[in-house]
Amino acid sequence: MGLALCLLVLLVLLAILLSTGETHTERLFPITFSIPREKLIQCTVSKTKVLSDLIPGDLSTYIYNTEASYYEEYAKSLFATTTKKGGWDCMRHYEILACGCLPFFPGIEECPKSTMALLPKRLLIESNALFSRLKTKRIEEVSSSEMSEYRTLRDRLMAYTSRYLTTDNIARYVLARTRHERARSVLYLSGCAYPDYLRCLTLHGLKTILGAKCHDFPKVAHIYYGDVATDYRGLYGKGFSYTGLLHSSMHDDALDTGIVERIKAREFDIVIYGSYHRGMPHYHIVRNVYKPHEVILLCGEDLHACDYAKHTAAGHYVFVREL
């Protein structure tokens, strides 16, 4: 009887596994930063230099105090240097691409397969190879055939960025991988509201899709404009690319009232924690009200001892930037 009971338990567990179609490791996905679609350049700027003067890590080149001048520097350059910082993924990659500039990314071949998994690494390696051929030339020495090759690669990368790397596309990626494409309302919870690229940009993408039906609590005030005049320059990265993106009407202030009661009443289809390392408010209530697969966790940290295994084992979907 003991053996029969064990076999019965194993069969039940196998049936459960087959019915769900996934294991806890299959609830773990890579994710990257992204760029708001409105930041993509709408026309080609005349190129005046082969390589941008803005060099990562060289603070003497960080001379741009407005987003417009910062973007213009990339737009008028054929190439711009970008590198691994604390993590492989970096907002600068997306800003360069958005400006119709090609990244020069030394060492990208060493990037782990699951990190920056959504970026077109082969195209970036092609960009490195093209730069190695043009780096000793002045802009006027670049031949017409080389410029044609450059434009072809630039257009491929711009098309890829538009199709896959904008904030709305990353938001759709999150919903699709978790099988929540039909979600019509999202509660987006944060432990704190200060800047976090992954949290802020993915939130912007969800807002782009769902409007105020994606409710951020607490309100991530720096992604909005329209309430009061705000100086974003004191924020991380001078606020470039992720601040002042949405009108304040995109946040329904009335939903802030009684948020715990709203969670208990399941007023939202799913719950997303924009940075679970930086806090998971009301999780003890969320886990009692929502099914495990209706809770999604994001990790945008550079360096961390990520404890995602316990969350995927609990049935949650987890997206990790530096996987």
Image (tube, grey):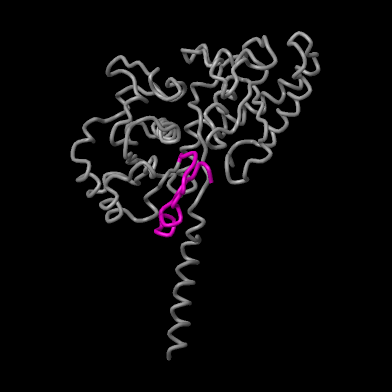
Percent position of residue 278, x then y: 36, 41
In the image, taking residue 239 as reference, residue 128 lies left or right, namely right
Give the total number of marks visible in the rendering.
Answer: 0
61 with respect to 1 (left or right): right
* Residue 223: quarter of image: top left
User: Who's the residue at 41% across and 36% down the image?
Assistant: 199
Residue located 71% across and 26% down the image = 153
Q: Nearer the viewer, residue 159 or 150?
A: 150
Using the image, determine if residue 68 lies above or below residue 33: above
Is 284 included in the stretch rendered in magenta? no
Depth check: give the residue in front, 75 or 271: 75
Residue numbers of the magenta segment: 300-323
* Residue 304 is inside the magenta segment: yes
Question: On the rendered structure, is 245 left or right of 111?
Answer: left
Residue at the image point whose x is 45% and y is 82% from the top: 6
Q: Quadrant for the N terminus, please.
A: bottom left
- Choose top left, top right, bottom left or bottom right for residue 136: top right
* Left or right of residue 228: residue 154: right
Horizontal and vertical percent for residue 318? 45, 49
Viewer-proximal residue, 268 or 182? 268
Where does the image place residue 229, in percent across and percent down from the top left?
30, 14
Q: Residue furthest bottom?
A: 1
Q: Position of residue 56 (x, y in %)?
A: 58, 24
Where 60 sits versus 18, above or below?
above
